[in-house]
Image (cartoon, rainbow, N blue to C red):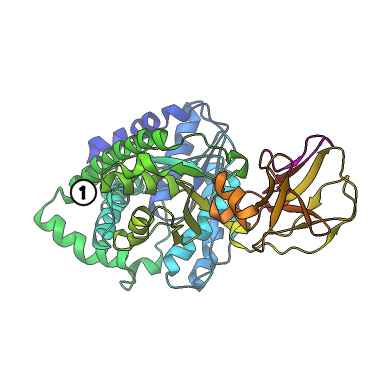
Amino acid sequence: MGQSMIDLPSQLLLKLEPWRNAAHWRIAFSGGLDSTVLLHLLATLAKSESLPPLSAVHIHHGLQAVADAWPQHCQSVCDALGVPLLIERVKVQPGASLERAARDARYAVFSSLTQANDLLLTGQHRDDQAETLLFRLLRGAGVRGLSAMPAQRPVGQGTLVRPLLEVSRAELEAYAQAHQLVWIEDPSNQDEQFSRNYLRRQIMPLLTGRWPQAQASMARSAAHLREAQELLDELAQIDLAHAATAHEFEWLGLPSLELAPLAALSIARQRNVISHWLEPFTQLPDSDHWSGWTNMCDAAPDASPIWRLANGELHRSAGRLWWLSGHWLRTPVIGADWQAPASALRLADNGCVMFSGQTPVGPLRIAYRQGGEVMHLADRGHRDLKRLLNERAVPGFVRGRLPLLFRGDELLAVANLPGLDGHVQDGWKLHWLPTDEDQGLS
């Protein structure tokens, strides 16, 4: 035990070596054992080492009356160590899981505070890692979930680092007692209604009683799983590269993949690459609810299947997959005549349209397809709009929101489709920007 205590500062310094040139090191300081030891270690190291500027942040959730005394405690600890402290009060949204809501509120603050080249340091240790693995195992997590907490990950514009993940709680307690540190014991940590507390207080002692190395072994398993996840991510990148082909509708600005290269993969690889691709956009279903993906692949060639997910929809159209969210899922409403055709016209939930070159004369209006529209083409006579859209393989979800330019009842142009988007002799074209800046990229 004594050995590892002596090593703790140098162990910590070694872990933080890659970030010695960061702009700022900020410690997430709850006042509990883990973050108290981390703060003390870093404040002590800062006396002998040239470290980036050090500060602490305490998040006050206000969930229990006893917590009202904690900001003052944290302030006095930081004052004694000469570390500036920021106290942030948050409102926790009541819901199914209070633990989760409190965590979300905390991390929202952490994200907003962490600027480019900043480091946010948190005190989770090896016992926490083992609990996380066990907790997620009981919830049926996959490889990503079972790789538990990463030692580092992006947060805000900077990086979150957990430098104590290989240190046990016992080692932290020994350090705290040796340096006579005072820390807060959160009474909610005794409440075994919370699954994690139950695991920590009831299950872990049983396991370590029989297998003293249980927590170290579980943390090691989490590390193996993290490596496995990294390999799965690399495989997904390889598979994505084959499916992220160029297409004629890049101007839609939508995430899109070609289906054929994905359909040629094994089912497991399909899931892996689709999960990887969709992860930034939406929560994904658990393994029991992937039938939507099967339907995507199995639907008839002329079908346009849709897979509805938590934050949007995956559409299959024109041989590709398209991720739609935000205003793409709202039916655009059309109304007004185009009074000032020289400038851009904003369309409700559908970006904006504008002309390049001459503006055509006459009372103009923009409308959307109702069905039965016919367009006169100089070289081909009258043609059904439906057929013209089919010839150009326009994705199904775009057809109802493609801006059509009318003069009276005459269909003059279809925005953005070469050969249909204007008049060569008169020298004008109709341009559509599907997402304008005001709507933000959902």
Which residue is situated farthest in the left direction here? 210
Reply yes or no: does residue 424 show up in magenta. Answer: yes
In the image, residue 228 sits, relative to residue 182, either above or below, namely above
Residue 130 appears in the picture as rendered: yes
Residue found at x 28% / y 60%: 135
Q: Position of residue 166 (x, y in %)?
A: 29, 41
Residue found at x 36% / y 59%: 295
Q: Position of residue 216 (x, y in %)?
A: 20, 45
> Helix or strand or loop: what does disc 1 sit on?
helix
In the image, residue 394 sits, relative to residue 201, either above or below, namely above
The amino acid sitting under disc 1 is: Met
Pick the residue in front: 388 or 442.
388
- 173 relative position to 401: left or right: left
Residue found at x 46% / y 57%: 304
Q: Position of residue 419 (x, y in %)?
A: 69, 39
What secondary structure characterizes most of the magenta part? loop
Reply yes or no: does residue 310 show up in magenta. Answer: no
- 12 relative position to 114: left or right: left
Pick the residue in front: 242 or 95.
242
Residue found at x 21% / y 66%: 202
Q: Which residue is mark 1?
A: 218
- Around disc 1, counting alpha carbons within 10 Å, would you say few (fewer than 14), some (14 to 19), or many (20 or more)? many
Res. 200 image quadrant: bottom left
Q: Which residues are magenta?
A: 419-429
Q: How many marks?
A: 1
